[in-house]
Image: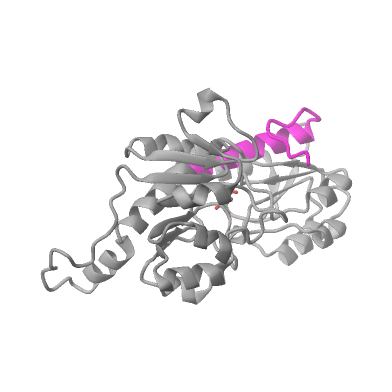
């Protein structure tokens, strides 16, 4: 007789290929229409007693949630590279293995950052709005002009895998790359990019600033009024990393005043209900946290999460563990 299939609590529906694997190899608690809340996840875990739980950034697992999980839970796999929605010490402290999904989403996140750079610089939100209204009259030669991207200087804060992939793409637009990072990269990874030990030193040289660092207590609100004022007037601001990195009141003020010409934002402090004042600004091009949202990448992320769950349940080393 086949051994009983492990019990998996799925916090969010996954792509068809991932769902097919899960339905074949696991006993599932029922598939949520879209996704559960943290409270629903805890209640389901207590009712269903799973061996494994799958979540992602929009489904936080904080210390109070971890404390209520039944002892049968052996592994939590987040379908994300970011881990700021998880209380890592609380999870590991209960002896629960934890994994994330690095690397597989690097390209799509970098592609999205380029989309935001192009859309914000070239006023895509305003043009789209005009076209939805039917266009209707010729534009003057000096009307609704954007900023040329080719040849501009791009500053990147956080030169990890995604930051480097953004730099690689931006070089294709003839952009000069500056970066600030906890440590300087080797020449192979730098590819001619200029290093600054602090963002403060780099900001005055940036035409475009793009964030690619994780959210943490240390980085919370780091892009504040003082930092924005260090950018040259008319700079473009891009955030496809985490909303918590930004003081949104300061960003709104800088966008209203024109000190920041435009912003491309995929992430917000209060997701999924961002500050309306940001969304209503004509010079904000906004997307709903979709950096990894392609069929290919979400499938790769889901498959990697399942690989981690299977490894943990078989007492094998996890392919991509979160250790601290
Ligand atoms: C989200 C992300 O996980 O990987 C990350 O850290 O922010 C994204 O890939 C995804 O959008 C689902 O919430």
Report the residue at 40% width, 61% height from top.
233
Looking at this view, name the residue that lies furthest to the left.
138
What is the quadrant of the C terminus in the image? top right
Magenta residues? 297-324
When the figure is inspected, residue 254 is found, relative to residue 301, above or below; the finding is below
Residue 274: image location, x then y, percent: 53, 70
- Given residues 44 and 162, the one toward you in this image is 162
Q: Can the viewer see residue 17?
A: no
Report the residue at 35% width, 45% height from top.
152
- Given residues 185 and 206, the one toward you in this image is 206
What is the quadrant of the N terminus in the image? top right
Report the residue at 55% width, 52% height from top.
241
When the figure is inspected, residue 241 is found, relative to residue 270, above or below; the finding is above
Q: Is residue 317 magenta?
A: yes
Quadrant of the rendered image containing residue 12: bottom right
Quadrant of the rendered image containing residue 166: top left
271 left or right, relative to 149: right
Q: Can the viewer see residue 58?
A: yes
Residue 139: image location, x then y, percent: 14, 68
315 left or right, relative to 119: right
Image mark count? 0
């Amino acid at each position: 007789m086949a051994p009983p299939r492990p019990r998996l609590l799925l916090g969010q529906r996954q792509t068809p290929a991932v769902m097919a694997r899960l339905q074949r190899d696991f006993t599932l608690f029922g598939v949520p229409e879209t996704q559960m809340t943290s409270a629903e996840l805890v209640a389901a875990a207590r009712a269903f007693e799973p061996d494994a739980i799958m979540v992602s950034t929009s489904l936080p697992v904080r210390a109070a949630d971890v404390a209520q999980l039944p002892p049968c839970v052996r592994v939590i796999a987040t379908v994300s590279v970011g881990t700021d929605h998880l209380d890592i010490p609380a999870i590991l402290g209960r002896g629960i293995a934890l994994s994330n999904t690095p690397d597989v989403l690097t390209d799509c996140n970098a592609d999205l950052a380029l989309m935001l750079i192009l859309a914000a610089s070239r006023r895509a939100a305003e043009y789209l709005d005009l076209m939805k209204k039917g266009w209707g009259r010729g534009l003057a030669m000096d009307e609704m002009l954007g900023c040329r991207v080719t040849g501009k200087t791009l500053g990147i804060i956080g030169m990890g895998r995604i930051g480097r992939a953004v730099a690689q793409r931006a070089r294709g637009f003839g952009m000069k790359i500056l970066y600030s990072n906890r440590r300087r990269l080797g020449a192979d990874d730098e590819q001619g990019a200029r290093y600054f030990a602090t963002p403060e030193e780099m900001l005055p040289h940036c035409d475009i600033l793009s964030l690619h660092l994780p959210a943490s207590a240390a980085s919370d609100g780091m892009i504040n009024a003082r930092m924005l004022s260090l950018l040259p007037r008319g700079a473009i601001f891009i955030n496809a990393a985490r909303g918590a990195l930004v003081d949104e009141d300061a960003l709104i003020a800088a966008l209203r005043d024109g000190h920041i010409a435009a912003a491309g934002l995929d992430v917000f402090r209060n997701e999924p209900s961002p500050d309306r004042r940001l969304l209503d600004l004509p010079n904000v091009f906004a997307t709903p946290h979709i950096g990894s949202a392609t069929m290919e990448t979400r499938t790769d992320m889901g498959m990697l999460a399942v690989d981690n769950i299977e490894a943990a349940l078989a007492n094998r080393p996890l392919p991509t563990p979160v250790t601290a």
